Each structure stands twice: as structure tokens, then as C-alpha cells.
Amino acid sequence: MNICITGALGHIGSKLIRNLSIDNLEKVYIVDNFLTQRYASLFDLPDGIDFTFYEIDVQSKIMKSIVEKSDVLVHLAAVTDAEKSFERADEVEKINRKALEHVADLCAEKGCSLLFPSSTSVYGTQEKVVDEDCSGRELKPQSPYADSKLFGERLLAELADKKGLKYVTLRIGTIFGYSIGMRFHTAVNKFVWQASTGRPITIWTTALHQKRPYCDLSDCVRSLNFFINKNCFDNQIYNIVTANFTVQHLVNVIKKYLPEINISFVDSPIMNQLSYEVSNKKSTELGLTYQGNLEAGIIDTMLKLRNVNTGIKMRTTT
């Protein structure tokens, strides 16, 4: 099997290319344009895998030949910072919409299956628990980023009907956990970064007691391997969620190890009163297992940052 991974040097991709567990894997085509300059993501790739790296934009004409040689394309290339996506509308349009249209058309044309990571941020529900079968009125994206993901879901469904595209959409919860290509704009990772560097944890004014879905990076990577191995490109949507937590719970776990942290409440373009849980029942019934752990993920990231500010002492527990 040959696979192509776009945006392969980012937070998820840099973990995936180090933890590929795919039956009969022959070649892996790594595609990234170095927009975020995460060169270190290419350091020390595992032996025994035939990698080929392309420093190209996803809309490059070269993508056609790559897709022709691939059985599966994992499309991780995207603008992923939801809050800053308000300021980056042009990039969201180019990368999250136009680039997806380009690779999806190529996949449909060449018979390459497409794995599309969407986001649980497409939900905007007043229900306490939501799943993939929710009504359309419960899909209310709160940012240009989330809106682009819902656009992608609908685009792929349309291409499946018109051109026979085979795909699967994974609505992934907010990612937490370390990778060599990680960024710190998502809630858990941002809080750990702020606390570890002596900054106040900045929390949206309305968010402290809201419950939202989160996904351990290891569970995310496990899900990508799982759907590829199972050849589950059934044109359906699956939630990929380790657990649902309130922001207060996240803060409490961090305080357990960095008890001197302070909290600062801030306003954000993404301001709502929504609190909801996302069910992962559909994916678990398919056979996917979740092994991630919030506290372990926080500790791991803290340990990576333990010498950034030696004036901040990390408490150890037994």
C-alpha cells in the first residue's frame, strides 16, 4: 500500500509519520510546503519505511502524479488555529477550501481513497450529548476554521455522489499531547505552555464551565492507522474523541503539577454559551479503542518544557 500525507510535518502529521502501523505499507509520500517552517519534523524518521518528501503546495500540479501512485491520501494540510482564522480568511479559503477541492477531485479521478480530518468544532448544539446523526440545525460552526471543515464534509459527500469518491470523515476533538511538530494554539497545549513559561492561563470569559470534546494525539494517530488498515472508506462521518472535559477540569489538572499558576479571563471572537459532549460510540462500535489520558498528556508536555523557565518548579506526585 502507498499512502500520501499532506501537511505531514504539523502537529498530527509529525506524530503520524513516526507511528505508522499500516499493513503492507510500501511507500509514504510526505507533502508539506514548510509554511510553518517545522523542519525538525523531518529529523530522525523511523527506519524501514520508504519515505519520499515533496516540498510543494497541495495545489501544485505535482500532486496529480503523487495521487496516481497512492492508494490512500490523508489530508492534514489546513489552517487549524480557529481563533486566528478570523484574521486569516484568505488563507482559510485557499488552504482549507480550494486545496481540499483540488486533492478531492484528484482522488475521485484516480481512485485514491481520501481520509479527511474534520473537527468536532462543526457542532454548535444546545443538546447535552451530540453524535454524528445530529440534525443540520446542530451544526453551527463558530469560526471560519470550523466553517471550512463543514464545507469540506459537504464537498466530499457531493463528490461521492457525482464522481464516486471513496472517503471517510473523522470529526476530531481538540487535540492535546506532544509531537515534534506541535503548536500551542489549542486549549490544553496552550494552557500548558502558558503555565510552564510563567504566564497566566488565558481563558475565554464564557468558557470556564463549558464541557467540550478533546482527543489525545495518540488516539488521533491510532484512529488514522485504524481506518486505513480497516479500509473503512464508507463515505461516513465518525467522531474521534478521547473524552469530554470542562475547562475548569483542564486547569485543575495543570494546577496539580504547577500550583502557582494564575488565570486571566479574556474576550474572543469565538464567544458562545454552548456546553456539550460529543459521543464516540460509533467509532468504538467499529472497533476503535481509545487509550489516551489527559493527565498523562499534560505531564508529558510539561516535562518537555521543564527547563524553559527554571524559576517555575513542577510538582511531582506519587
Image (cartoon, rainbow, N blue to C red):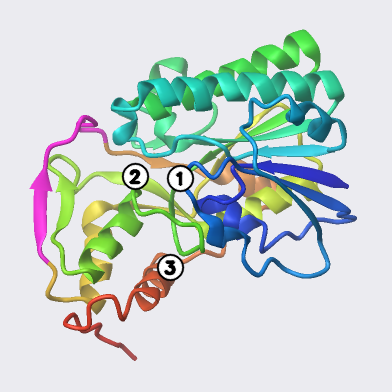
Residue 297, numbered label: 3
Observer-nearest residue: 21 or 15?
A: 15
Q: Residues within 10 Å of mark 3 (few under 14, many from 20)?
A: some
Three-letter amino acid code of the residue under disc 2: Arg
Query: How far apart in space, not on screen, are marks 2 and 3 (Cα)?
Result: 17 Å
Q: Mark on residue 212?
A: 2
Instruction: Find the distance from the CA under tag 2 to the CA under tag 1.
Output: 8 Å
The reply to whether dot 2 and dot 1 touch (C-beta < 8 Å) is: yes
237 on left or right of 124: right
Q: Check disc 3 and give the amino acid type.
A: Gly
As for residue 258 lying within the magenta part, the answer is: no
Residue 178 image position (x, y, % from top left): 46, 64
Question: Magenta includes 264?
Answer: yes
Dot placed on the residue nearer the N-terminal end, 2 or 1: 1
Mark 2 element type: strand
In the picture, measured across the screen, residue 287 lies left or right of residue 76, that is right
Q: Place residue 54 in its image quadrant.
A: top right
Instruction: Pinpoint residue 227: horizontal percent, then vertical percent.
Output: 72, 45
Residue under pointer 1:
173
Compared to residue 114, the image places residue 307 above or below, namely: below
Question: What is the span of residues highlighted in magenta in the rendered image?
Answer: 262-274
Q: Earlier in the sequence, mark 2 or mark 3?
A: 2
Q: Residue at x 68, y 33 (%)?
A: 168
Residue plotted at (57% across, 45% down)? 281
In the depicted view, which residue is nearer to us: 76 or 251? 76
